[in-house]
Amino acid sequence: MNEYFLLFNRIEWALIFIAFAVCFQSPNIRWLIGNIIVLKTVDILTIGIIVQWGAFYYLAISLYDVVIISMILKRQKTAGYIASLKIPWLSRLARSSAQYYNLTSNEISLIILYLFSIVINLASLAERLIRKYSEFDPMFIYNNYPMAKFVVTVLSVLILCSLAINGANNIYQDRKSNKL
């Protein structure tokens, strides 16, 4: 099963990387997808270790989901801070992202999806603790966990691809924000 998740994580990473390349006209979306690429890379590099943590695995991947949600919601502040660091290519992208910041409906869908992922993780953790510390042996969430996470992952990739297509069509470029 771990080999399946590792392969699927790599496929997901490649698709997100393609989405990053496609949305070159929208610095807002490019910044968002770039952040997710960085977090997905950390996920791919650490998943082999995190899986061995038992119940803490669910907390670790929930934290990963919380970080993604935070990066979406705090993107303008983060981009503004990175822009002030004067890193040649990164600061230019960050400055454009902060300038053209706009929370889109697709991003709200992504936030809701990651919140759902956190609920699945915590429910699975609760079920594991019930199995471990009582004689009751619920297995509903445990048995459905891989498919639920698969659905969440596929939907998140579809949303990111939709964002990338909108970015490639220059839909978000002209919506300037004066907040910085």
Image: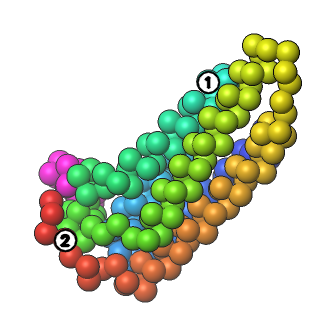
Mark 2 → mark 1, Cα distance in angstroms: 40 Å
Q: Amino acid at mark 2?
A: Ser
Can residue 42 be seen here? no
Q: Which mark is residue 177?
A: 2
- Out of 162 and 112, give the one closest to the viewer: 112
- Out of 164 and 155, give the one closest to the viewer: 155
* Mark 1 crowd level (few <14, some 14–19, many ≥20, 10 Å Cα): few
Q: Position of residue 122 (x, y in %)?
A: 62, 35
Q: Secondary structure at mark 2?
A: loop
Task: Name the residue: 51% across, 64% down.
Answer: 109
Q: Is residue 84 magenta?
A: yes
Residue 121 position (above or below residue 112): above
Question: What colour scheme has been applied to the protein in the rendered image?
Answer: rainbow
* Mark 2 crowd level (few <14, some 14–19, many ≥20, 10 Å Cα): few
Quarter residue 134 falls in = top right
Q: Viewed as shown, does residue 95 lie left or right of 74?
A: left
Task: Name the residue: 58% across, 37% down.
Answer: 61
Q: Viewed as shown, does residue 18 lie left or right of 100?
A: right
Q: Quadrant of the C terminus?
A: bottom left
Q: Position of residue 15 (x, y in %)?
A: 61, 64
Q: Main secondary structure of the magenta part?
A: helix
Q: Are marks 2 and 1 in contact (CB under 8 Å)?
A: no
Q: Position of residue 176 (x, y in %)?
A: 21, 76
Q: Position of residue 40 (x, y in %)?
A: 54, 48
Please, which residue is most extreme toward the bottom here? Answer: 169
Q: Secondary structure at mark 1?
A: helix
Q: Amino acid at mark 1?
A: Phe
The residue identified by callout 1 is 56
Q: Which residues are magenta?
A: 80-92
Residue 10 position (above or below residue 171): above
Q: Quadrant of the N terminus?
A: top right
